Image (spheres, rainbow, N blue to C red):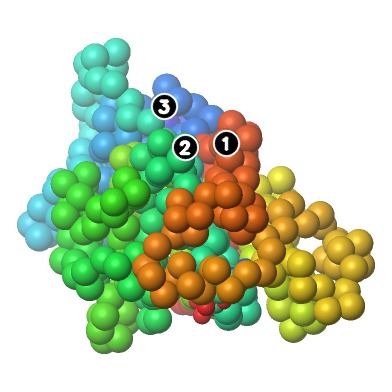
Amino acid sequence: MALFLDTSRGDSEATAFAIGDDVVRVASAHLLTRALEDNRDETLVVIDADFDLASALAIASEYRIRRPSLGVVLLRRRIDVALIAQALQAGVREVVTVDDLQAISAACKRSREVSARQLGVTPTIGQGQIVTVFSSKGGCGKTTISINLAVALAAIEKRRTVLVDLDLQFGDVGISLGLPSSPTIADAIPMAGQIDAKGVAALAHHHQSGLDCLLAPMNPEEVERIPGALVTELLQVLRSEYDYVIVDSPPAFTDTVLAALDLSDTYVLATTPDIPALKNLRITLDTFDELGYPRSAWQIVLNRGDEMNGLELDDIERALGTNIHLVIPQSTDVSRAGNRAVAIVTDKPKHPVAMALQKLASMQRGLEAEHVGAAHAPQRKSRLFRRGA
Ligand SMILES: Nc1ncnc2c1ncn2[C@@H]1O[C@H](COP(=O)(O)OP(=O)(O)OP(=O)(O)O)[C@@H](O)[C@H]1O
Ligand SMILES: [Mg+2]
């Protein structure tokens, strides 16, 4: 079998025929991920000429590491030396002109032969769990939850964990953990298309808890130069290096946040018990439904949940149409820990806030079995948010 990532609306029958027997077409990168998870023995992916180059290279570099026996053949309308160099660096096996059917057929045959030789001798690297902490209203506790969840996973659960600060404009993970201000995610920009384990290691700050962190840039100009495709590439490499990739986010559906949400295995959705935050969460949940992020992967966290201000938990759950999975109490000790650049989860492990956050960390294990590699919804962004082609 071969997977043909075919986003063109035109006639690609002849191309499919040239690829060989038993070609399965997939219409988006997400469907490709899903198909590859379902077919662990698959050895060939052909990417059509209309598919965005940066995303194609990101796919090649991810699978070069995760599944070296999988060959990627890239079709383009025009080929030049620079393109070939870039593609080969990313791990593409061959680049072929889309209208040269004979060359497509020969490239696919060669790639299958290479894979056949590799199979059985090259180990497949594991896949960690990506958890994005999100809320569309600011100040609900995303960063507090992200930091403590990540520290708990690293220090208490002893899992290889990385925290990625995707609040690119105003990220405060670095300052909250007392880390130096550089390097940052912006230092990945020159590595686009060829990020590997060494590259991410050069970007990561090591925290005393055992946690690694990728920090938000200090310079707003750099933020504009970080596209969703770069985040996709980064997260894919991180997933092959760590057991858990925790993503802190800004309170908005930006392109980079959508890239993270699209790749996430589970979602921690934070709210506080007040009407504006609950209204925003309701809209977020409807959006998640539309995007196809499965409800079983949602973890709804009610932060400051002991300050209900006249609201009842039952009413909140009814209004949201879903259960609250975890309640974190309110305490001034949270800000105090933040001001001392420590995580409450390890600084005061018996504190009720710390215990709730430790529970959130242990809850990830249950979801891990169910969701990792499940590669959620098909064509999420394309339906709601895609800008341009
Ligand atoms: N359970 C809590 N009890 C008391 N204070 C809290 C609690 N959770 C968070 N805080 C405090 O609320 C403030 C906002 O929290 P945090 O920065 O984690 O929110 P955020 O959702 O990341 O905000 P933003 O949208 O601005 O990124 C911080 O000062 C934090 O210390
Ligand atoms: Mg924050």
Closer to us: 137 or 327: 327
At horizontal 58% and vertical 79% (from top left) the residue drawn is 139
* Quadrant placement of the N terminus: top left
Residue furthest top as drawn: 120
Asked if residue 209 is positioned above or below residue 388 in the image, the reply reads above
Can you say which quadrant of the picture contains the C terminus?
A: bottom left
Q: Is residue 223 above or below residue 347?
A: below
Locate residue 252, reporting x and y percent. Answer: 55, 77
Q: Say if residue 230 shows up in the picture.
A: no
Given this view, does label 2 or label 3 mark the residue nearer the observer? 2
Disc 2 crowd, CA 10 A, few/some/many (<14, 14-19, 20+): some
Q: Residues within 10 Å of mark 1 (few under 14, many from 20)?
A: few
Q: Regarding mark 1 in the picture, which secondary structure is present there?
A: helix
Mark 2 to mark 1 CA distance (whole Å):
10 Å
Residue at mark 1: 365
- For marks 2 and 3, the one nearer the N-term is 3
Q: Is mark 2 within 8 Å of ligand 1?
A: no
